Image (spheres, rainbow, N blue to C red):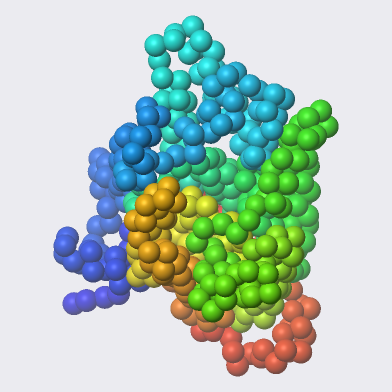
Amino acid sequence: MSAQPPTDRPDVANATSDGFVRGLSQAIGGPLGAHAVPPGSRPGRFWTAPRIVMALACLVLALSWVQKSPCMDGNWQNNVQYTRYCYTDVLALYYAEGLNEGKVPYVDHPVEYPVVTGYFMGALGLPVHAYGASHPNINQGSWFYNVNALVLCLFAVLSVAVVLALRRRRPWDAAILAVSPIVLVTATINWDFLAIGLFALGLFLWARRYPVGAGVLFGLGAAAKLWPLFILGPILIVALRTGRLRPFFSAFFATGVTWLLVNLPVMVFWHESWLRFFRLNSERPVDWGTFWYIGRYLDGKWNAGTVGDQGPFQWLSDHIPTLNYLSYALFGLSCVGILLLGLLAPRRPRISQLAFLVVAAFLIFSKVWSQQYVLWLLPLIALARPKWGAVIAWTIAEIGYLAAFYAELMGAGGKTVIPEGTFVLASTFRLVTVAVLFFLVAREIWRPELDDVRRSYGGADPDAGPLDGPEASWLTGFRGYFRVGPSQEAPVLPDEPSPAVQLR
């Protein structure tokens, strides 16, 4: 006798809804049946799915530290930082930002990062320098990197724990973040996991119905890297669909006040240093591997690039202010499209789905796409669309891009390693896979019956927090104006009254 396993049991939902996980489960006998004893239900059993995922996350981060070890001494001869794939801004900027000389960020040296990242650099770097001054035999750069790596890995583990807490019915979703090769090679390239950890914890507080606390953490995250601010747009869309704007405004003002308070000292007393981040991003040219870089390369196939013989992308590369406006305009139009999708979709979209779309759109049209920015998307795709097939294809594209990027950097020294066309091909593959993920997430918003997370939670959004509940009455008329009628309603279960209870 066979039966379909219930989707509300931990460890079951992933193995039955995702083909990749279902295939892997065959190694241990296949997905759990309806009468199987779930892992962790027997007294004394330690290795439950969440603990396995957390252990795997720690293992991957430990391997990441080993992978970066050839670069820890700072003796980067013969392009070792590229040939061993161990380059890290953390070590390089210990010297570039004057921390090795005891310079206080913003006070003695303008830092190219938002203030929370600058505070973080100073809080770890200045004690290392002070200790190194009295212990001249230590390698200060190595010490600085290792201290940063330890703290950043703690933020990475925190991020995995939050994904597990938000998906208690689907613990294996968190493995998309925990075991990703992307984490292995990029976890400590820069300080991005600082912002990711703050953002993740803010999303957890939001799901637990603490909008003010969530806003505080979103504000801190935005003061570390700007992108956590983007979560306010998805929250607003869901607030409009439910007609409950008060939680949104609570989070919005808490985010703004927090951001202002942590920026205010530097903004007031060291204003020029504070402006360094904004001016740098305004003046930066087209970065490696971006949409604009690909376009400029293709322009070069038909145009010489000289004045009077330039393609549109070549021209934009020489007119950065115009490029900035166009990049912002395309991102703004993408946000308008996401807004319309969120309001016209048959069911209220999940917040993590909308958040992924916004961040992905920002990266697609940005003139800068640093190698570690991929980390921004990992926890969001684990929450938005935890289906391994597309994620694996995207991961392959990202790792391939990183290899081509380092080869291109080695070639910048004068000796060609790979043709530029190969690098452009890798960049295009990475761009296309992100765009495909964007499309797939948008499709599941428009066709919610395809959404496995929604199905696992009985039609509800486990991240909705204080916005859980029925749709606003005004929405019926709005959707009717666009001819989105009841016939397009998806056959999914009704929203549950309180997804926050599921996070206990």
Q: Between 156 and 332, which is closer to the camera in this rendering?
A: 332
Q: Position of residue 464 (x, y in %)?
A: 61, 61
User: Can residue 127 be seen in this snapshot?
Assistant: yes
Residue occupying the point 44% across, 8% down: 135
- Residue 106 against residue 176 in the figure, above or below: above
Residue occupying the point 29% across, 68% down: 20
Q: Position of residue 130 (x, y in %)?
A: 54, 13
Quadrant for the N terminus in the image: bottom left
Residue occupying the point 63% across, 21% down: 103
- Residue 469 against residue 206 in the figure, above or below: below
Q: Position of residue 249 (x, y in %)?
A: 78, 55
- Residue 484 against residue 204 in the figure, above or below: below
Seen in the image, is 441 located left or right of residue 143? right
Q: Position of residue 388 (x, y in %)?
A: 36, 66
Residue occupying the point 68% across, 28% down: 109
Q: Between 412 and 143, which is closer to the camera in this rendering?
A: 412
**Tally of numbered tags:** 0
Q: Between 47 and 106, which is closer to the camera in this rendering?
A: 106
